[in-house]
């Protein structure tokens, strides 16, 4: 509260000072005033867009991103924002599909005039919406887009979410550590989703690399609720490991139905099940599901300590990966904006030029985030060092649970 007030005042002061400064910026044809381009900061701050799923079944994942982004906004504004000017997050709900993401991105780019966008939630949405931002030369940071090919969408597209090729194999290795007897593996995936198709490829390759036997590959849709036929077909082949690539609602239902049909072996869930929002779906039967992680609440850095404290005091539980990744996305924009601002005041720059400068800067920085130290390849792929595997531990009542991190 206190800091917000402080920063509104600061921003107003900055602008007022700018307006009656005895040494105003020289007016050239490139100045925003002369060209009629929008100024990038207002009394409320420098606008950063958050285009994630706040409604639909994908909100089970996206709402954790909203939480992480908001914590970042407060945190960085309490530290002075962009060298004294606060940031202001602008939210546009993408819903769960491609068209929703396209609409949200267009609104952020043309109406809200953001400097950059953290979003969308799904890779499936990114393949449709990111090209729009790329053509408009607006930098995008994917907070949770892990499919193969995301940074390659364009020069303005990068991600803070490590790809499935790096993350997913860790859970298979963890399963083998828990049960070295595993031989037969059944794989399930949602065939109507780009991320799930990408993730299952990696899972299936890992199964082969580990000399395990892939006994069946079962397909479903992210909108499905009944998995009896696929689950029965798989169980009949007596797998001792099941690997699921789906989203939270369908994935949680599949876990539940596999257990109800008597499957007793280990289950690995992919990134789409990586939220405590699966707990109400599979309840006590979620217990034991293994999920690879690109974040740990125990990450030892100072910024993670601050993020974790803020999250825990608000939500009374440990922060999840999607919140940490959204925080990291906002952080990258903030720190890159700070660097740009030191060269040439952000508040005085025309928006198109600022977006280009921001994109260039963010790709060369190093960031100490709650995910650990991250940077980017020139193409916009995240370079990250620390990965983990967690296992769901449900309380006896089946209504609450947590992710316990494996050593
Ligand atoms: C992707 C994902 C999602 C499951 C995260 C929300 O990893 O779509 O790429």
Image (cartoon, rainbow, N blue to C red):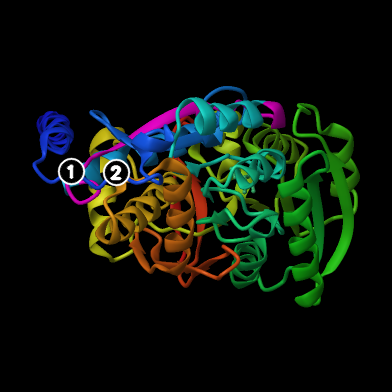
Residue at the spot 75% in from the left edge and 76% down from the top edge: 210
Mark 2 secondary-structure assignment:
loop
Circle 2 crowding by C-alpha within 10 Å: few under 14, some 14–19, many from 20: few
Q: Is residue 373 above or below residue 312?
A: below
Q: How many marks?
A: 2
- Which is nearer the eye, 110 or 68? 110
Location of residue 150 by image quarter: bottom right
- Determine which of the numbered discs, if any, sits on residue 27 in the image: 2
Q: Which residues are magenta?
A: 81-99
* Left or right: 341, with 182 as reference point: left
Residue at the spot 43% in from the left edge and 60% down from the top edge: 362
Circle 1 crowding by C-alpha within 10 Å: few under 14, some 14–19, many from 20: few
Mark 1 lies on residue: 24
**Picture coordinates of residue 1, whole percent (x, y):** 14, 28
**Picture coordinates of residue 225, whole percent (x, y):** 76, 26
**Picture coordinates of residue 108, whole percent (x, y):** 50, 31
Check residue 83 for magenta coloring. Answer: yes
- Which is nearer the eye, 241 or 208? 208
């Amino acid at each position: 509260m206190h800091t917000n007030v402080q920063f509104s005042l600061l921003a107003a002061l900055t602008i007022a000072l700018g307006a009656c400064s005895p040494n105003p910026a020289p007016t050239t044809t490139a100045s925003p005033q002369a060209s009629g381009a929008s100024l990038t900061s207002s009394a409320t701050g420098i606008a950063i867009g958050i285009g994630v799923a706040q409604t639909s079944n994908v909100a089970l994942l996206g709402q954790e991103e909203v939480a992480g982004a908001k914590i970042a906004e407060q945190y960085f504004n309490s530290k002075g924002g962009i060298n004294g000017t606060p940031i202001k997050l602008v939210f546009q709900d993408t819903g769960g599909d491609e068209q929703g993401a396209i609409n949200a991105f267009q609104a952020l780019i043309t109406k809200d005039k953001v400097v950059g966008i953290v979003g969308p939630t799904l890779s499936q949405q990114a393949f449709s919406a990111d090209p729009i931002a790329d053509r408009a030369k607006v930098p995008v940071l994917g907070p949770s887009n892990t499919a193969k090919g995301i940074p390659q969408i364009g020069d303005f597209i990068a991600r803070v979410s490590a790809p499935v090729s790096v993350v997913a194999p860790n859970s298979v290795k963890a399963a083998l550590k828990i049960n070295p007897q595993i031989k037969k593996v059944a794989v399930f995936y949602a065939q109507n989703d780009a991320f799930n198709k990408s993730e299952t490829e990696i899972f299936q390759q890992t199964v082969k690399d580990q000399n395990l036997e892939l006994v069946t590959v079962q397909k479903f849709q992210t909108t499905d609720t009944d998995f009896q036929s696929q689950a029965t077909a798989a169980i009949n082949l007596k797998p001792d490991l099941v690997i699921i690539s789906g989203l939270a609602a369908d994935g949680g239902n599949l876990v539940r139905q596999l257990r109800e049909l008597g499957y007793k072996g280990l289950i690995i869930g992919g990134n789409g099940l990586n939220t405590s929002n699966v707990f109400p779906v599979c309840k006590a039967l979620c217990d034991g599901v293994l999920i690879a992680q690109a974040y740990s609440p125990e990450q030892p850095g100072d910024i993670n300590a601050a993020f974790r404290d803020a999250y825990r005091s608000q939500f009374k539980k440990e922060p999840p990966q999607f919140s940490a990744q959204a925080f990291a996305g906002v952080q990258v924009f903030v720190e890159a904006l700070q660097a740009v601002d030191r060269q040439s005041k952000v508040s005085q720059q025309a928006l198109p030029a600022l977006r280009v400068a921001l994109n260039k800067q963010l790709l060369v920085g190093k960031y100490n985030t709650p995910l650990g130290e991250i940077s980017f390849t020139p193409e916009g792929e995240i370079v990250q060092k620390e990965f983990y595997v967690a296992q769901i531990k449900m309380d006896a009542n089946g209504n609450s649970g947590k992710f316990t991190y494996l050593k």
